[in-house]
Amino acid sequence: MTQDMDSEGPQTPGREGDNAPAFSVSEISGAVKKTLETRFGQVRVRGEVSGYRGPQSSGHVYFTLKDEGAKLDVAIWKGVFQGLRFRPEEGMEVILSGRISSFPGSSKYQLIASSLEPAGEGALMAMLEKQKRLLAAEGLFDEERKKPLPFLPEVVGVVASPTGAVIRDILHRLADRFPRRVILWPAAAQGENCPPEVSAGIRGFNALKPGGPIPRPDVIIVARGGGSIEDLWGYNSAAVVRAAAASEIPLISAVGHETDVTLIDFAADKRAPTPTAAAEMAVPVRAGLVAFLEDLETRRRGAMRRGIEDRRATLRGLARALPRPESLLETPRQRLDAAAAGLPRALALWRAAQERRFAEASGKLEAARGRLSERRSGAARALAVTGERLNHAPQRLIALKRRDWAARPLPSLRPALARRAERLEMVAGRLDSAFRAARAQRIEKLRGLGQLLESYSFKGVLARGFALARDAEGKPIRDAAALAPGDLVALTLQKGEAKTRVLGPEEGSAPQPPLTKK
Amino acid sequence: MSVADADLEKLGFEKAMAELEDIVRRLERGDADLESAIALYERGASLRRHCEAKLKAAEARVEKIMLEAGAPAGLAPLDPQGGGS
């Protein structure tokens, strides 16, 4: 168990002679330990991690660092291990810092590591890839998890260092675009505090109650300035990635420069190349919105005005198409005027005609009366002559008879005379009555003639409700064919006169075009 | 009006803007009857007021969360200039 002692071991004070006092095992082990720790109190060793099995129940970690030709036991105490930014992994090329010490109980030496870092970018990138695969397998980077950013957040939460350019850049850009209320959650941007503080910030913002004393952000920006891959390493940590993926508030990651990619970028809802770009994603440009709103307002007013104008124009057009009431009445009014103007003339004409006819009739009547009275006076004369003769007839007859009788014997003259006188008396009486009868008869006849004459007059017909229709010249109209539509017709009624205009022939009497339509 | 305003209060800026845009487009198409057009116009006016109010309320306030034992305990004004770099 101690055969493997280094050949250069006896470098200690007991080199002088064989008589030198012998070391006890503990003494020599302690001396070796002391020598190792003095000589290799601070070393950096590069090698490949081998036999790594994770922390023991004590929390300490043991593994072997090896290269092609040698092996070195390594111990990392619990307190150191918990503070490591990078956890060792089997096969990982690392550089360990620490001191060499021995373990006297088994005569072994080992490296007590105080820090561990991956050896070179390649190793880091390999770790990053592996970490990414593991977290991706959990579904933390799935596209379905991505939430849309709010168009206009009221409150912007920023998880970043309270000092430095990052928060200033964000505030500047927010002020330029759309000033918003910003709440900063201070968090270390690198080092071992970075992952817990950043993830606490993300979770803390999410834990805020809406309407609480501290307003809950509508969007979170996790930002950090540029740096080396090691500087940014905290944003690759599973804690930060999980917190970002679990965030209910939409989250923008803006870690490092454009070319730097950290795992929070995959879990974030949106990745911004720089903190300034994150601010641009978080809020719209206020001036642009104001302008757009103004444009909408102009269009809204314009559209309404045009709508009303169009309707007005349509209404105007319709109103124009509507006939004017005056024009509707014009034609009938004109016809009425014409009829009214013709009425007095027609009346005069009619009257003249009537007068003419009356004169004619009365002339005829006069002539008839003349003839009648002539006949009457003739008859009276004849009657007077006859009467005269009749008056003288008795004396002549008496004279005649007397002559006869004087010549003749006068036997019994007296009775005959008496008879004759009696007969004369009778004849004279009959003459008288005959004359009266003849006269009465003639008077009766004259009256009959008068009545006849009266009945021949048109007035009787008018009294029965007929009307006399005459044309413009006053000539009676007997044939409808002589009339044209629009002709004036003078009507004479029993009482008064009227003028009318021909509308048209009676239905079916003549194929004339309708009068009223035009 | 008050009902519509209350309804507007809950309306986010983007939604209000989108609705206003839609209203303007419908007005511009001109196929709404007059009553609807007037209603649209008035709704548009309310939306515009709402959007403008949202745009006016653009105030910058910058605060920092004060932590006590890792939990947020309050807010303090942040002066990033004074913080130094």
Image (tube, coloured by chain):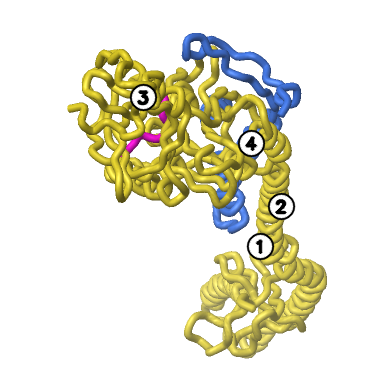
The residue closer to the viewer here, A491 or B45, is B45
- Asked whether the residues under the numbered discs 2 and 3 touch, taking CB atoms below 8 Å apart as contact, a structural biologist would say no
Q: Earlier in the sequence, mark 2 or mark 3?
A: 3
Residue A250 in view, yes or no: no
Q: Chain of mark 2?
A: A
What range of the chain is rendered magenta?
A83-89
Circle 2 Cα neighbour tier, 10 Å, few/some/many (<14 / 14–19 / ≥20): some
Amino acid on which the number 2 mark rests in the picture: Gly
**Res B51 label:** 4
Crowding at dot 1, Cα within 10 Å, few <14 / some 14-19 / many 20+, comes out as: few
Q: Nearer the viewer, residue A394 or A210?
A: A210
Percent x, y for residue A39? 45, 27
Residue A445, quarter of the rendered image: bottom right
Q: Is residue A86 magenta?
A: yes
Residue at the spot of label 2: A302
User: Looking at the picture, how far across and down is residue A303, in whole percent?
Assistant: 67, 53
Q: CA distance from mark 1 to mark 3?
A: 109 Å
Q: CA distance from mark 4 to mark 1?
A: 41 Å
